[in-house]
Amino acid sequence: MKSLIYILLIVTSGITYVQAGESSSSNINLTVSEVKTFRIDKRLVRTILYNRADLPYFELELIKAPNRALIRKVAVNSIAAEFEKRRITMDFIKSAAVDIENIRVEKNTILFEVGFTAAEHTAPYIYSTCRVDITNDVFSSPACRILKWGNEDISSPSP
């Protein structure tokens, strides 16, 4: 009796199992590590984060709801911030390590943090907070401020 109930639970659970074979493939690129979708007013924003070893960047998509038509897509592969009166550009592709964390939305703004180590041997670890504003269906360039330089906490104005 228990096995009959178990079989009924499996059949009615809504889970479909598909065996992967040589001819099957995933609709999601295998370098994608995380996808999130947020609502901003009448639009959807989708963030696509790739495996940092394969593709150290992420994409932002602005999608028209409810028909899910892509309005705009942008790849974020570098950020810039001011540090000690000079502009620091952090190129994700030319890094030893980059971590994109805590992606979230507040009103018409996408917020995220970036942990970055340049490829140079003596480069410090840089931790930044960034924002991308959405105005008239257009993404702004990331505006960032450095929170940590090496082991030193930095206090600077918001981006």
Image (cartoon, rainbow, N blue to C red):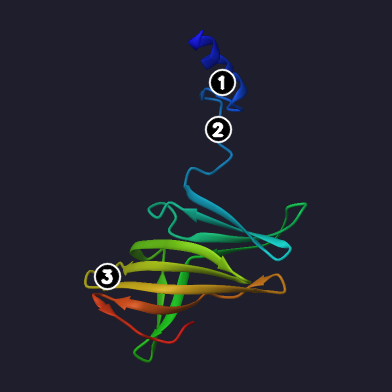
Q: Is residue 1 above or below residue 77?
A: above
Which circle's residue, 2 or 1, is located before the other in the chain? 1
Which circle's residue, 3 or 1, is located before the other in the chain? 1
Between circles 3 and 1, the one closer to the viewer is 1
CA gap, disc 2 and disc 1? 28 Å
Between circles 2 and 3, the one closer to the viewer is 2
Crowd tier of the residue under label 3, counting other residues whose Cα lies within 10 Å: few below 14, some 14–19, many 20 or above: few
In the displayed structure image, the side of residue 96 where residue 46 appears, left or right = right
The residue singled out by tag 1 in the image is 9
CA gap, disc 2 and disc 3? 38 Å
Mark 3 and mark 2 in contact (Cβ < 8 Å)? no
Give me the disc on residue 120: 3
Q: At 46% across and 70% down in the image, what residue appears?
A: 78
Crowd tier of the residue under label 1, counting other residues whose Cα lies within 10 Å: few below 14, some 14–19, many 20 or above: few
Give me the disc on residue 25: 2
Amino acid at pointer 1: Leu
Q: Is residue 50 above or below residue 6?
A: below
Q: What secondary structure is marked by label 2?
A: loop
Rendering coords of residue 25 (x, y %)? 55, 32
Amino acid at pointer 3: Glu
Rendering coords of residue 88 (x, y %)? 39, 81
